[in-house]
Image: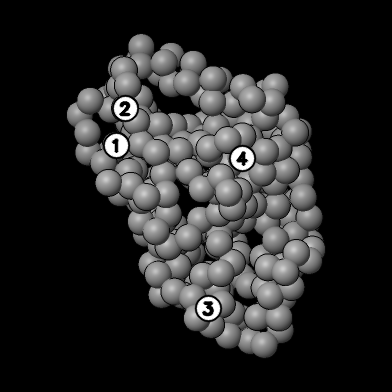
Amino acid sequence: MYQDIEYQVSDRIAVVTINRPKVLNAIRVQTYKDIIAALQSAEADRDVSVIVMTGAEGKFTAGNDLRDLLPEGDLEGVRDGVAGIFDTLASMKKPLIMAQEGVAVGIGANLLLHADLAYAGKSIRYSLPFAKIGVASEGGSSVMLAEAIGPKNAADLLLTGRFFSAAEAEKWGLLNAAVEDGKALETAMAVATDLLKNHQGSIKAIKALSRGEDHRARVNKAVLAEMDAFVGLLATPETQMRIQHVLKGGK
């Protein structure tokens, strides 16, 4: 059923694993489709109470597969995928836990803004390299990141595109905890198991109340505005040159 992910349900916990390890679990159009379908399946499944998302072979994700952003790539598919995944996340009622290791770039880092709980190996490297590539920020980060970690910290990460650490992410509250490398999924599963002991209606109500009535519309508005800017910048020669440079191994 799925090409780019693994999806497993056991003891009321659904685990969604990005599974393209040969390309550091980079997310292509098919990956978006698979993740969206898996999240929607877990949300609709009465036998699932908690959802955990992770990446295969000790890496979370290197972000968008840049080959999709070339002139011959499926840009409309990317746009639909980005809009679709964040709309799905914004509409979910069940708790979502991130378990990240190795690297989480672009959307991989932005997913922290949409998770209820998050754990990462202490040596993980995060980056929001949109300005380095020559595109706009995505995933609602243009609005939500400043709210989460403060406007100066958000500007630092978005304007420089620098790598930041699990310790920084934990300090800012993007992570619940930085754990020993290789222990993020184990930690997330232990927390998920603890959540199963609580009243599931109460958990859903707490999540809904914390988000506010207009959360989904607000996320979608931000994401769509970001993608308009993203697509506009993608058409410029400088951005295409920067993408080609990265694909050839440049930094």
Identify the residue position indicated by label 3 in the image.
Answer: 231
Residue 45: percent from left, percent from top? 22, 33
Q: Residue at x 62, y 22 (%)?
A: 183
Q: What mark, if any, has residue 26 been given in the picture?
A: none
| For residue 7, side relative to residue 140 (left or right) | left
Q: What mark, if any, has residue 59 been given in the picture?
A: 4
Residue 63: percent from left, percent from top? 58, 55
Identify the residue position indicated by label 1 in the image.
Answer: 42
Near-viewer residue (112 or 6)? 6
Q: Residue at x 59, y 26 (%)?
A: 184
Whether residue 71 can be seen here: yes
Identify the residue position indicated by label 2 in the image.
Answer: 9
* 4 or 1: tag closer to the N-terminus: 1
Q: Residue at x 61, y 34 (%)?
A: 58
Residue 113: percent from left, percent from top? 55, 46
Element type at mark 1: helix
Residue 121: percent from left, percent from top? 67, 29
**Which of label 4 and label 1 is nearer to you?**
4
Element type at mark 3: helix
Q: Are marks 2 and 1 in contact (CB under 8 Å)?
A: yes
Q: What kind of residue is marked 3? A: Val
